[in-house]
Amino acid sequence: MSDQPLQTLGEFLIDKQDDFQYSTGEFSRLLSAIRLASKVVNREVNKAGIADIIGKAGNENIQGEEQQKLDVIANDIFITALSQREVVCGIASEENDDFIDIKCGENGHLSKYVVLIDPLDGSSNIDVNVSVGTIFSIYRRVTEPGTPVQLEDFLQKGINQIAAGYVIYGSSTMIVYTTGNGVNGFTLDPSLGTYYLSHPNMKFPETGKIYSINEGNYIKFPQGVKNYLKYCQMEEGDRPYTSRYIGSLVADFHRNMLKGGIYIYPSYSQSPTGKLRLLYECNPMAFLAEQAGGKATDGFRRILEIEPTELHQRIPFFCGSVNMVEKAEEFMRIDSVK
Ligand SMILES: O=P(O)(O)OC[C@H]1O[C@](O)(COP(=O)(O)O)[C@@H](O)[C@@H]1O
Ligand SMILES: [Mg+2]
Ligand SMILES: [Mg+2]
């Protein structure tokens, strides 16, 4: 550990003012709202076992998925933190059927940013004390400033994101984000409530030996995915690779970025578009992946160039070390021309 004091996230934001595309005070306040909310969610996640917040909330979200209590709690925390700070004019969340229009400032709608969020990613892991996360994606609104936000403010291609990131509530809590100037990771010192720059300029290794996929769905996968998995498992060269699947996108992505690897959630018979949502899971993770020198596609097309058609649309997701994603795409292409 160097004897240099680690830079805090606040100091990093100030130092980056010069090359920040969005170094307006408003953007820093937006990130500060996310930072604050992440600390409150972190406290809830850490006491989940002793508070009455384990288990199901008793209703379903628009995805038809059982909401966990912590899904709802995290959603409320992020929406409150973002709304109260008057730094966004609209929010879309995995846990809300429709987007939310946020009136701010005496004239209303002074902010130019909208945020799309998966407040609690990896819900199935909450009750078993395995890492979970939050994923966020930030755009400038495209409709007339000072008017209520509209669906088209949210249905933007991923290439239009001005920032994206995740919080991982794991053995330590981290914020990892990009504004298009590379990817940086900050670790929370919970005793001080301060995030410190612990992982500057994060990069996906060009290749890796880890593949992350829910092989329980194997028989339903496209043949191209099955053939790629057989390739990973063959005794040849640096293979067989290692299978690691946490079941929290944020945690699997984070490990793969640090060690090299590929995460795949493909289409399968019951769900031709896969499970993950384009707008608040795949686009932000794809922005991070590309900024860290990795790759993210739906098996054929660059995620960030896919034209969204609805708020909660799903998309197959292949993301990680560029060489591994391109090898998987090769198998998908071969299968698609048969
Ligand atoms: O349990 P499955 O079908 O393997 O799906 C796991 C995937 O689903 C997710 O939990 C979906 O995210 P949510 O928990 O936010 O709904 C991802 O985090 C994870 O990678
Ligand atoms: Mg999720
Ligand atoms: Mg979620």
Image (tube, rainbow, N blue to C red):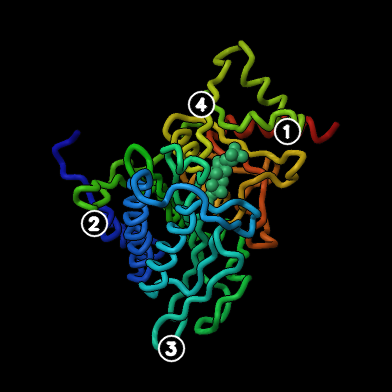
Specify the label residue 221 is tagged with: 1
Q: Does the residue at mark 1 contact the one at mark 2 (Cβ under 8 Å)?
A: no
How much space separates mark 4 and mark 3, taking CA atoms? 52 Å
- Amino acid tagged 2: Glu
User: Residue drawn at (34%, 67%), measured in percent from left and top?
Assistant: 29
How far is disc 1 from disc 3 in space, using C-alphas? 52 Å
- The residue depicted at 75 percent of the width and 45 percent of the height is 272
Q: Is disc 3 placed on a helix, strand or loop? A: loop
- The residue wearing badge 3 is 107
Q: In terms of sequence position, does the residue under pointer 4 or pointer 2 come before the other?
A: 2
Q: Is residue 256 left or right of residue 233?
A: left
Nearer-N-terminus badge (1/2): 2
Q: Looking at the picture, tell me which residue is in the foreground, 333 or 95.
A: 95
Q: Tag on residue 11?
A: 2
Is the CB of the residue bearing disc 3 within 8 angstroms of ligand 3?
A: no
Q: Position of residue 239 (x, y in %)?
A: 57, 16
> Of 283 and 269, which appears nearest the observer?
269
Give me the C-alpha separation between circle 3 and circle 2: 32 Å
Question: Tag 2, which secondary structure?
Answer: helix
Q: Could you say which quadrant of the image residue 24 lies in?
A: bottom left
**Image quadrant assignment for residue 77:** bottom left
Dot 3 alpha-carbon crowd within 10 angstroms: few under 14, some 14 to 19, many 20 or more: few
Q: Would you say 49 lies left or right of 147 here?
A: left
Amino acid under disc 4: Gly
User: What number of labels is visible?
Assistant: 4
**Of the image marks 4 and 3, the number of the one nearer the N terminus:** 3
